[in-house]
Amino acid sequence: MVEFKSVNEFRLKGGKYFMPCISIDCVIFGFHAGQLKVLLLTIANYSSCGLPAGFIYKEEHIDASAKRILLERTGLSDIFLQQFYIFGDPKRCDENITKAVFEKAGITAPADNWLLQRFLTIGYYALVDFEKVNAKPDYFSETCEWYDIDNLPPLAMDHAQIVQKALLTLRTHLRYEPVGYNLLPAKFTMPELQSLYETILGQKLDRRNFQRKMLSYGILKKLKEQRKGVAHKAPYLYSFDLRKYHKALEEGFQSAW
């Protein structure tokens, strides 16, 4: 990796080290208080929000790039990442954003500057435990904040489309693969797991059918503990059997939702 002396040096000379016209955008999902949330950055010198994004070094694997970009842009590490789509609309890049940032930073960039070119972007989505995340903005950003997926601010370029595609992909994966380990605390109740699934799918699920289906997969361990401090009958706590969970991630479920 290259250590740039300043943000301006990165903007002017970064094209020498990164793959031309290819970027990575990351949709980071978290779950809190019955809401699916997305982590967004406020672009410095532009006052608009966008996804954590970055570029691929010429000798770097794209999966390694996605992990590095998340670490550099948000401080997050060791989280689940899934590549889901390539966005290649010729009009997806808005060079006016880059020009405005250059202008506010006092940079005079040539017309063929690498950041002013058309970019294809590879989408990744990440699933994280909201309670464990302490994301911080980098020097390209003013803030790094969670937003409810149903109440997102206006996003730069095609980032709103990327978020929606990530959500549709997550919903598809949810029907064939386990989801929850990266979004819930280590111990959770069956109603909490059902609430997560309902929030992602955007629909209500029958309680008995949901519990029967989830238990049939063999990925849950029922604990002897019960959730305390609830108004009604205290529900039992569950945890994921990680060996079976990861096997299901690799092989998928035998029957979908």
Image (spheres, rainbow, N blue to C red):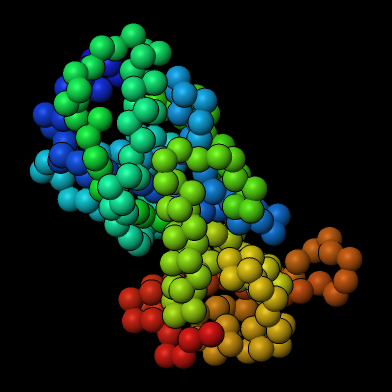
Q: As drawn, is 129 to the left or to the right of 173?
A: right
Q: As drawn, is 148 to the left or to the right of 233?
A: left
Give the farthest residue toward the right.
231
Residue 7 in the image: x percent, y percent?
Answer: 30, 19
Q: Is residue 84 above or below residue 115?
A: below
Residue 98 in the image: x percent, y percent?
Answer: 34, 26
Count of numbered circles on the image: 0
* Observer able to see residue 153: yes
> In terms of depth relative to the viewer, which is nearer, 169 or 226?
169
Q: Residue at the spot x=49%, y=58% of the render?
A: 164
Q: As drawn, is 137 to the left or to the right of 223?
A: left
> In terms of depth relative to the viewer, which is nearer, 229 or 175?
175
Q: Is residue 47 above or below residue 120?
A: above
Q: Quadrant of residue 249?
A: bottom left
> In terms of depth relative to the viewer, which is nearer, 174 or 227?
174
Residue 100 in the image: x percent, y percent?
Answer: 39, 21
Q: As drawn, is 214 to the left or to the right of 195?
A: left
Q: Is residue 254 above or below residue 71?
A: below
Q: Quadrant of residue 5?
A: top left
Q: Residue at the spot x=42%, y=46% of the render?
A: 158
Q: Residue at the spot x=16%, y=30% of the render?
A: 15
* Observer able to see residue 68: no
Q: Residue at the spot x=46%, y=74% of the render?
A: 172
Give the farthest residue toward the front.
91
Q: Is residue 201 above or below residue 48?
A: below
Viewport quadrant of the N terminus: top left
